[in-house]
Amino acid sequence: MAGTLIYQLQLAHTFQRRFDSEELGQALSKSHIYVISRRPQVRLKEQSVMFHPRQIQFEVTTKANSKASLVDYSLDLAGEDLQQACDFRTYQDGSYFSFRVSSTLMHGDSWALAALCSRTKDELSRQEVMYVGMAFGKDGSSNAWHRTKRHEKLQRIYEDHVDGGWDIFVSAYEIISCERAPVDHIDDSEGGDPQGILDEAEVFWDRQGQQPSETAVRLIEHSLIAYFDPPYNKVLNRWRADEPTAEMRSMQNAGFRLIVVHLSGYGSLVRLYSRQVKSATRSHVILHDIPPVPRRPTLRGLSAERVSGWRASLLRLDDVEGVIAEGELSEIVFQSFGERAPAVRKPPEIDLDVEGDHRTIEEREEEFHRISTIDAQYDGPDFDHETGRFSIGIGLDGARLYWEVWDRDRLLRNGVIMGPPDSGKTNSLTVGILGYLDSGLFVPWLADGGGRHDLFRKWGRAADWIAANPKELELMVSAAVAIAEYRRQDGAYQGLSRKTPGILVAVEDLHLALDSAPHLVEKFERLSEIGPASGVATVVTVPDSNLARFGGSRRLRSNLGSGHRQVFGIFDGDDLFADLKAP
């Protein structure tokens, strides 16, 4: 009788970025095996991002291979917590992203987000194995550092793929378990029980440290290389039972004739394949043996010509596809973007502006609460006809906040009120509308982009026009543009007066309105451009300054935000003003 070694590997993380030696050593510090792979670039289209209650929709673009045409995929991320999502941004040509959920910053590779939201769709998750390496030492770091310090292979892979439309990945795997079975796949015996079952010398597993031995890591590295046959591995590409390595001899001397390596796909986003392994799957089961006197060497798989049926069934060798299928059906673990994701995954040139903020979550939530109650400090209308200002409340620093209706040249200011749900946007807009009404110089035209507010009950007696649906909003904006155009062409507009009052076009949830009626973007662009000089002001509420909130129009975002703007309830809101200023 002889035995079987069974190892299971679990993916720790897949990194998509360029590394120097120290960074790669840090990334692999707790892993045992790493796989370098490639796939056609996946890029997130920022202008496609649309926010809905408890859902974010977006598009990514990629190719089936480097020579194929670009293909767009429409995806969505759903969850109860996304009710508080805002501030979606992309970096490095759409390869990296970030957004906030309340006080939490989520960020990561666009590829990982696409793989997650597509449920590891083959076209978005498949990666071709280029190289397999070993990282091993105390806590998995010592040897990893020495190996990666002189690791020119990774740099060569980067150089070979520069400007070729490829992304390069490093997947770090941990060897999480070792089972030793007193049975293998063939009937003929070599006599006695295998000594390796006891493994008192801990040749194949460090019991005290609960980690694999160096022999085990080398065996697994060899089996993975022989299985995938990556193009950048030049040794160990074949498992030759007739020419065993030192580790294979240790295995044989201990009485093990079969090694099973289960590359588990549980929770992972990566589907690995190679020129040798055509099927891209999340899990792989790799079999290699050293049977007694094989008639012919088998470079991959099993050399034994006759495999026992009951032994194969006991070891599940006759159900390899079933083991792989279990990995395919396993849940995807949302660890690529949260606290479990390693910090080194972020490219250093991407500035998320989180390092300078040392507030705790509790402090940020307290600030959110304080800002969201700011409307309670409003004292009533106090429009100043000389300056065109009125107060809208008290800021966190105790200073009074003002809304400026016009600038020094008496040109009206458009306005943007930003903040996530429940941050006080509607209250701020209410105060703003009251200020315009108090002037006696404006008639309010009001619209609700998401149908969430009862405008008729609230403003039925004061508003000149209320648009209750997208069709009426289209009529309203068209009429506002027509009035602005008429006043410009005929010189009929000589400034605000009770005879020629200004028009306040106020839209709650502009992003929802443009989401349901994207053809309105052009009308809003025109209105925001010519309105201020024609007595028509446009004021909107949006969750944040993300371009998608403005129908993907930089022109509209700049026209609305270049003048007066207010921020309520959004953390680090001052940093978003740069977006509003940029045309």
Image (spheres, rainbow, N blue to C red):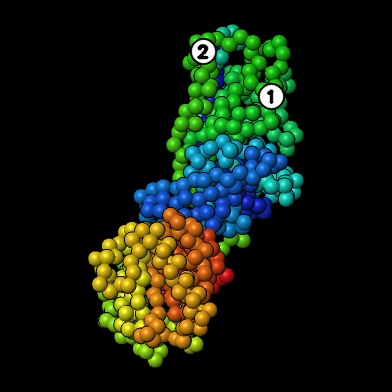
Q: Which residue is at a point 52% across and 38% down the rendered structure image?
A: 120
**Label 1 crowding class (10 Å Cα cut-off): few <14, some 14-19, many 20+?**
many
- Relative height, residue 493 to residue 56 (above, below): below
Q: Mark 2: which secondary structure?
A: helix
Q: Quadrant of the C terminus?
A: bottom right
Left or right side of 282 for 565 = left
Q: Is residue 309 visible?
A: yes
Q: Which residue is mark 1?
A: 239
Q: Which residue is at a point 51% across and 19% down the rendered structure image?
A: 319
- The image quarter containing residue 36 is top right
Residue 522 coordinates in the image, percent (x, y) = 52, 63
- Relative height, residue 329 to residue 320 (above, below): below
Residue 217 coordinates in the image, percent (x, y) = 60, 34
Tag 2–tag 1 contact (CB < 8 Å)? no
| Type of amino acid under label 1 | Trp
- Relative height, residue 184 to residue 452 (above, below): above
Q: Which residue is mark 2?
A: 311
- Relative height, residue 240 to residue 490 (above, below): above
Left or right side of 414 for 148 = right
**Label 2 crowding class (10 Å Cα cut-off): few <14, some 14-19, many 20+?**
some
Give the spatial CA distance, label 2 vs label 1.
22 Å
